Amino acid sequence: MKNKILLSVGWFSFALLMAMSSCKSQKTASAKESLPSGESTFIDTLLVKIKREACFGRCPQYYATVYKSGFAEYYGEMNVKKVGQWYARLSSEQLTFLLDAIRENKMETMDTAYSNPYLADFPVYSLWVADKKPRKKILLNHESPPVPITEFTQIFEGLLDQLRWEQQAKARKDEE
């Protein structure tokens, strides 16, 4: 009887392990990103992302993502210099600089939202950070968010401005 119980627990554990690994492979497969210029597909994970949202005025609308490999993508929507899909690559020094900024400003320890419900048309933006901990999203809609978040945002956007962006080629009509 004892052997049957152990055998059943063993098979259950094996089945559970197989189910968990199949879910993980699906998540990994969905995280694949295609590189510009025909480079091969690779698996990468998010390091930092910023998304600036619309307002009633001329707020810049865009999102930019930097992955742990140093690959960066930018999509400009409105009120920005670069409209459309753009790609760049951070140098190892730039990537180290960004990691240091995340850690020095303790971005992964910040609250998930800094919002003032009385600011109807205040520019809203979100930050996602995933250095050592799981991905953290921080929503900002506040006239005075914590200084470390403001400093990190300035550092990150300054770094994005320094990158050599290449625009993704648009598909021709006959390829659509």
Image: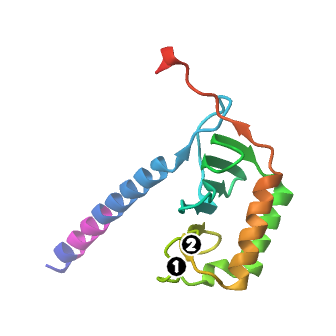
SS of the residue at dot 2?
loop
105 up-or-down from 85: above or below:
below
Q: Position of residue 151 (x, y in %)?
A: 76, 76
Kind of residue sitting beneath label 1? Leu
Residue at the extreme top = 174
Q: Position of residue 171 (x, y in %)?
A: 55, 24
18 up-or-down from 173: above or below:
below
Residue at the extreme right = 93
Instruction: Give the residue displayed 78% in from the left and 68% down from the top.
Output: 155
Reply yes or no: does residue 12 show up in magenta. yes
- Comparing 136 with 1, the one in front is 136
> What residue is shown with label 2?
122
Overall secondary structure of the magenta stretch?
helix
For residue 119, the mark is 1
Reply yes or no: does residue 55 show up in magenta. no
In magenta, the rendered stretch is 6-14
Label pair 2/1, CB-CB below 8 angstroms: yes
